[in-house]
Image: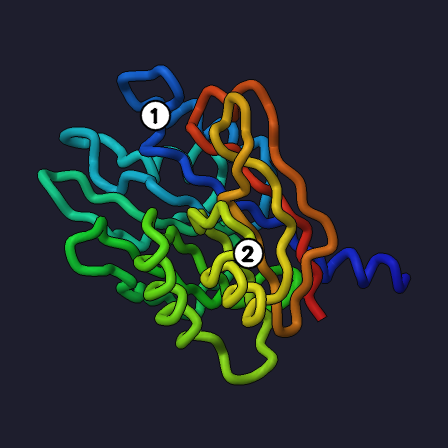
Amino acid sequence: MAEAARARRALRVATWNVHGCVGAGDVAPDPERVAQVVRALDADLVGLQEVSCCRLGPGGESHLAHVARVAGLRALRGTTRHSLGLHCGNALLVRPEARVEGVAVHDLSVARREPRGLLEAVVATAAGPLRAWVTHLGLAAPERCDQVARLLAHLPADDEPLVVLGDLNEWWPFGTCARRLTAALGRSARLRTFPARLPVLALDRVFALGGARVVEARVHRSGEARRASDHLPVVATVRLG
């Protein structure tokens, strides 16, 4: 009985930079391939980065809408880039039965750099209420340090369960930004996810804090995942309470 109760308090979460649904060596996006990988993850929450939110044509679906429909999930979007009809950024996919109690998009952009943001959602899951962040930090260290400071300003003041799903672009574990994140969010497994064909850099991370903790994390290394993007997904089990 106690074991069943503990199982109900666990969630499977994932983070994945889908690279506009364009895989290594591809010239055109393939959202169907990405959708099949997301479906195979079988996660309760999936944070996506670099996903297109614009329609593909009259009556057509966006990449995000297509991925969510095929995976049987509901999409919350956090668009950060608007240019020439290309609307893309972060997204959070949740189970259809999960009740979303609030969504916000915080701007983390730095002047003269690619727009960045933080998608924040409060979700009532089967395991309990959870605040989820999805983000994608910049390429330059000074840019990331500025973004980390602004990101951490949104930390809940109480012990509310929080999971952070993101492509942090932080490849040096002893840098200022990495140490600041670890001090505020706790340690996170450094799993090699980039480049997908032969991963050497741990760019994609899952953090859990407050009333949540990561009890297991791994890289999803399927052949389809290696072909679908230049990053591999990270999947983690998060326990609440």
Q: Quadrant of residue 228?
A: top left
- Label 1: state its secondary structure: loop
Q: Residues within 10 Å of mark 2 (few under 14, many from 20)?
A: few
Amino acid found under the numbered disc labelled 1: Val
Residue located farthest toward the right when viewing the structure as drawn: 1
Which residue lies under the disc numbered 1?
22
Q: Work out whether 158 lies above or below 229.
A: below
Q: Relative to 229, does residue 171 appear above or below in the rendering? A: below
Q: Residue 175, which numbered label?
A: none
Q: Nearer the viewer, residue 196 or 72?
A: 196
Instruction: Classify residue 26 as left or right of residue 124.
Output: left
Quickly name the residue at label 2.
174
- Residue 113 in view: yes
**Seen from this angle, which residue lies furthest left?**
84
Give the mark toward the camera: 1 or 2: 2
Q: 10 Å neighbourhood of mark 1: few (<14), some, or many (≥20)?
A: many
Q: Residue at x 45, y 64 (%)?
A: 100
Kind of residue at disc 2: Phe
Using the numbered discs, state the Cα–Cα distance from disc 1 to disc 2 in whole angstroms. Answer: 31 Å
* Residue 65 percent location from the top left of the image: 34, 39
Determine which quarter of the picture holds residue 186. Answer: bottom right
